[in-house]
Image: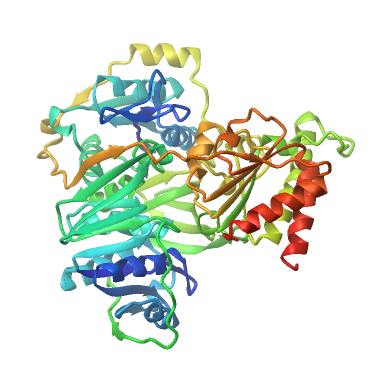
Amino acid sequence: MKIIVCVKQVPDSAAKVVVENGKVSWGDAPLVINPWDEYAVEAALQQKEALGGTVTAITIGGEGSKEALKHALAMGADDAIMISDPALANLDTQGTAQVLAAAIKKAGGVEAAFFGRQAIDADSGLVPAQAARLLGWPALTLAAVIKVDGGSVRVERGVEEGRQIVTAKLPAVFSLVKDFGEPRYPSFMGIRKASRAVIPTWTLADLGIPSPATVIAWPEIMNPPSREIKCELITGSSPAGIAEVLADKILAEKVL
Amino acid sequence: MNTFVYIDQFKGTALPASWEAIGVGKTLGTVKAMIFGSGVEALASTAFEYGADEVLLADDPALADYRAEAYAATLSASATSAAPDLILFPTTTRGREQAAMVAIDLKTGVMVDVTALENVDGKITVTRPIYAGKLLIKETCSAKPLIITLRGRAFPKPAQQPGKTGTLTRVAAAAGDFPTKVEGYTTGEGGVSLTDAGVIVSGGRGVSNNPTLTPPAGLDEKQAEIWRAQQGFILVKELASVLNAAVGASRAAVDAGYVPYPHQVGQTGKVVSPDVYIACGISGAIQHLAGMRTSKVIVAINKDAEAPIFKLARYGVVGDLFQILPALTEAFKKKLGK
């Protein structure tokens, strides 16, 4: 099965992210592959191991974003493609989906496009379904289990009520959740391979599409209001005594 | 402003954030609630009572199960003919997906998981959390219709007006050969859903540290740890049950195998905003705090007085959760008459 995994480079989830002088800063925290995309790479490699085929990682961004591709290569992806163009500096999710859909088409013969469920920076979680819509492929989002059988696939999707079991024909778009196990650590050989990999860059001209229109604007970005909280420590001579006071305090908040 | 509101339902029960969306729509003008499914006409009466002026009902066996493509085609067809100014969705799994797909069909954008909305002379600006709530961003959209998904519990649920009715308009389910087939469902554990919960009781790594327990013979070290944690989570669940609360967990507890992933609160789990959040044995990693920091009242029970969770907590107990939790459960049982 020919699989494309779409990945993104984001500030580490442990980063303290703040707005300074109107700009987002994550201090000296590292940029890493989006954790959800790392699960998607793991899921893609598991499919490849079960079925054969290839896994190609793809990203949109500047030179720094290449690290996400190298991480996917070090984990075991076969190759990687970088989409980079000055016209792509300010994409909204619709624009991102247009570019990725065009790249998935250009790659040719793709049977499955894998995405993490969302990126932990913008937290939108829209791009997989939007790319599917543009490609005209089934959107199999929030997939927790994927079973491919010939040209068909059976997916268990995580929804509020439990799991929905869906079958569809390939090609399809998948967004992945955490249920495929911890992402594998890159091997020494994998890291060496990744560091030597030649990663082609595709521009909008290569994709043959015009610059996507950006319809969402971001007039302001802010730190959340700080919580002026002084923690009241409840003490007492016995657990029952502490619990009694704590329960009264919580009830007095009149939110229960 | 002429607003469509997508009512997200599963087997005839609407997710509560749908009604909150009707409330937001009513503050902006008229509301047409869109209800898709099979045998779901009863929901129309409820939508009227929550304030909908009109219901667009696609009640068709072909829509019995949620299928992304079939629902989006029906929704986009209605929106194309009626040309609303705004389409509101609850930020549920289905709501988010429909918003994403319909925005492509209608060549517009999506403002997702919005927690505040202002309308100045018909120009809408929204605020939404990014980086799991570490930052807030304002957004506008230059295309029409506006498509917005609203975070559950961020907006008040409108008062239900018993007996209020409105115009029921039937719309056709989009015809077509849609590419997916629903084979069935496996149900979750039931209980209260985290994102809708008014109260959440959460457990972390500390829940596995009860020194007074002796695991059954024959377990290896890891199995014994999980067994201990499961005993600890029984205490968490008992308190949750008395408070009609959902059960949450830290990433550390989920990764260690103590509880399944759907319980995870935080940056790679669910972002929640209950009235009361009781954190038991959770130290408060930044990824966890990001996922629950907007809770109204945070209570922390932890044996480590230096744990970062106390910085967000309104009330704290530095102590042994294995003693405090059962006592707290008993105290609430008595006070709530249960």
**Residue B331 vertical position relative to residue A230 in the rendered view, above or below:** below
Way the structure is coloured: rainbow
Q: The N terminus of chain A is located in which quarter?
A: top left
* Relative side of A65 to B181, left or right: left
Residue B233, given in percent of the width and then of the height, sits at 72, 46
**Residue A173 vertical position relative to residue B147 in the rendered view, above or below:** above
Q: Report the residue at 71% width, 65% height from top.
A: B336
Whether residue B231 is visible, yes or no, is no
Residue B335, given in percent of the width and then of the height, sits at 74, 63
Q: Report the residue at 54% width, 62% height from top.
A: B185
* Relative side of A204 to A51, left or right: left
Q: Nearer the viewer, residue A46 or B283?
A: B283
Residue B21, given in percent of the width and then of the height, sits at 36, 65
**Residue B203 vertical position relative to residue A203 in the rendered view, above or below:** below
Asked where in the image residue B52 lies, by quadrant, the reply is bottom left
Whether residue B311 is visible, yes or no, is yes
Q: Nearer the viewer, residue A12 or B272?
A: B272
Q: How many marks?
A: 0
**Residue B336 vertical position relative to residue A21 in the rendered view, above or below:** below
Residue A194, given in percent of the width and then of the height, sits at 38, 16
* Relative side of B96 to B143, left or right: right
Q: Nearer the viewer, residue B120 or A206?
A: B120
Q: The C terminus of chain A is located in which quarter?
A: bottom right
Q: Nearer the viewer, residue A238 or B218?
A: A238
Asked where in the image residue A200 lies, by quadrant, the reply is top left
